[in-house]
Image: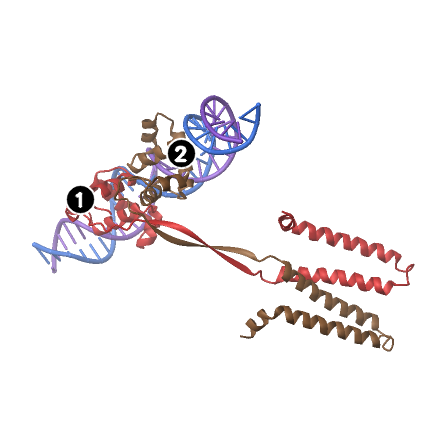
Chain colours: A brown, B red, C blue, D purple
Amino acid sequence: MISSFIKTHKQSIVYGLAMAVMLFVLKWLELKFIIIRHSFEIYAGLIAVIFTGLGIWLALKLARPKEKTIIVEKPVYVSHENFIVNDEALQQTNMSRRELEVLELMAEGLSNLEIAGKLFVSLNTVKTHSARLFEKLDVKRRTQAVDKAKRMGILK
Amino acid sequence: MISSFIKTHKQSIVYGLAMAVMLFVLKWLELKFIIIRHSFEIYAGLIAVIFTGLGIWLALKLARPKEKTIIVEKPVYVSHENFIVNDEALQQTNMSRRELEVLELMAEGLSNLEIAGKLFVSLNTVKTHSARLFEKLDVKRRTQAVDKAKRMGILK
DNA sequence: ACAGGCTTCATACTTTAGGGTGATTTTGCA
DNA sequence: TGCAAAATCACCCTAAAGTATGAAGCCTGT
């Protein structure tokens, strides 16, 4: 309640305080020539305090708030009863032909070596494709890739 | 663009300014006894600048940064088909409860370690279950197991 | 012609999966 | 109650999967 009041009226409060300080300084200046002893130190201290405050205010005002991103998982219901693959979802993944082929063979339970054999490429190539494909699907393992691809309707 | 430059080089800028101020102070100290007139005003100005800086530094350093939370919705693909598992096929496989549980988690793309965590058992236990389960399904790999189980209707 | 994506492959290294074996403890049920 | 099946775990070792990095050749569109 109090904090929210301060929050909503921060601007006004700050300006009000600034005004008060100003008036105080002016008043003090009138007395300047009376209290001549130690006036320098007092003045210096005052300035220090005031401008420290100003600095803090400036920093708080100007510093950009750090952004914190919260990822909320939003369910997307997909039915793949129709064995028509979801081309839309496929496009979004940005998957290349070869990567899709590898993914399909993965889904059939083939090992990387077997996939390499079927596609007439080296084991390393299959690994490269699979690594890329994992990135694009945002997964870490082939089993996850297959699961996600099926949920998305990329695979039947 | 400019603000991002300031952001990424904040440290450097702050140190640079600090250096400049230091040099200025030193230079000023040399002239202190010459320019005795107006030294008060100069001193005051200096203090103002320095303490403004101090205030900014204090605020930036000590004040906990305001966190601005950005909520990003991340789609999670879910298939909502109520599948009737093929109990008959399940019986024939002779799978135990635990083995089925492991199989289900495998199908979700979990690693053996993750499965172990979910089932509160050791990694070795999961391996034992998976090995048995592979035998019963007559497959060699987890990916094959998942594929076959789905085809058989054991898994949704 | 050149930038950029795709495909291909390599090397080296780490992590995870899987196979084989054995052992102990639960537990369901005859 | 006793026993077989199930569940648990350990150790050791090999195979496969995955990570990281670099690089070369090939298309494609600007």
- Amino acid type shown at disc 1: Thr
User: Would you say residue A134 is visible in this rendering?
Assistant: no
User: Would you say residue A133 is visible in this rendering?
Assistant: yes
Tag shown at residue B93: 1
In what element is the residue under mark 2? loop
Relative horizontal placement of residue A75, taking residue B140 as reference (left or right): right
Which image quadrant is residue B48 in? bottom right
| Viewport quadrant of the C terminus of chain A | top left
Q: Residue A6: x, y in percent?
A: 59, 72
In this view, the mark in front (1 or 2) = 2
Residue in the image at 68% along x and 70% along y: A15
Tag shown at residue B55: none
Q: Residue C22: x, y in percent?
A: 25, 44
Could you tell me which chain the residue with mark 1 belongs to? B
Q: Residue B100: x, y in percent?
A: 23, 49
Residue in the image at 77% along x and 52% along y: B20
**Between marks 1 and 2, how big is the CA–CA gap?**
38 Å
Residue carrying label 2: A96
Residue in the image at 36% along x and 35% along y: A100
In what element is the residue under mark 1? helix
- Amino acid type shown at disc 2: Ser
Relative horizontal placement of residue C29, taking residue A32 as reference (left or right): left
